[in-house]
Amino acid sequence: VQLQASGGGLVRAGESLRLSCAASGSNFDIYDMGWYRQGSGKERELVAVMSGGGTTTYADSVKGRFTISRDKAKSTVSLQMNSLKPEDTAVYYCYAKFWRDYWGQGTLVTVSS
């Protein structure tokens, strides 16, 4: 299983950014897929995850601002991030789970004030 994330960058507070993750090496229809993040000096935390059945889970801090979506035909998962805040600055990791966790390489999102 390989997860390739893209879309990170530097934006100003209030702007938007979209992350994408392409998965390969398995049938991801039944996987949970989503995003975690890790800020400097902080623990890795869940941002948003969508189960294979379509159930979504969001961190309270991003509810109403971030939207996760999946394209099962393309084995991709995306994260639309709106109204970004400086506290959203982190390395964002693509995530997949089926029996075990899989992680992508991470993409840096920096939000300036």
Image (cartoon, rainbow, N blue to C red):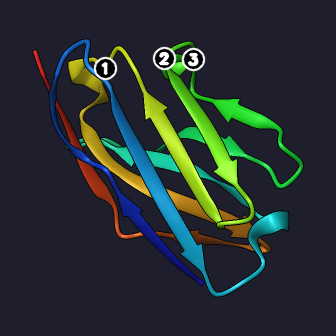
Residue at the spot of label 3: 63
Tell me the SS state at disc 1: loop
* Figure quadrant of the C terminus: top left
Labels 2 & 1 near each other (Cβ < 8 A): yes
The alpha-carbon separation of the residues under discs 3 and 2 comes to 5 Å
Could you tell whether 5 is left or right of 65 in the image? left
Q: Amino acid at mark 3?
A: Lys
Residue 18: quarter of image = top left
Q: Say if 6 sits above or below 92 in the image.
A: below
Other-residue count near label 3 (Cα within 10 Å), few / some / many at <14 / 14–19 / ≥20: few
The alpha-carbon separation of the residues under discs 3 and 1 comes to 12 Å
User: Is residue 44 in view from this perspective?
Assistant: no
| Residue drawn at 59 percent across, 81 percent down | 24
Q: Nearer the viewer, residue 103 or 79?
A: 79
Residue 56: quarter of image = top right
Q: Where is residue 3 shown, x and y percent of the image?
A: 50, 72
Q: Amino acid at mark 1?
A: Leu
Residue at the spot of label 2: 65
Q: Where is residue 36 shown, x and y percent of the image?
A: 48, 47
| Residue drawn at 78 percent across, 78 percent down | 27
Residue 68: quarter of image = top right
Q: Nearer the viewer, mark 3 or mark 2?
A: 2
Q: Where is residue 46 shown, x and y percent of the image?
A: 54, 41
Counting residues from the N terminus, which is met first, the one under dot 3 or under dot 1? Answer: 3
Labels 3 & 2 near each other (Cβ < 8 A): yes
Residue at the spot of label 1: 84
Q: Nearer the viewer, residue 6 or 48?
A: 6
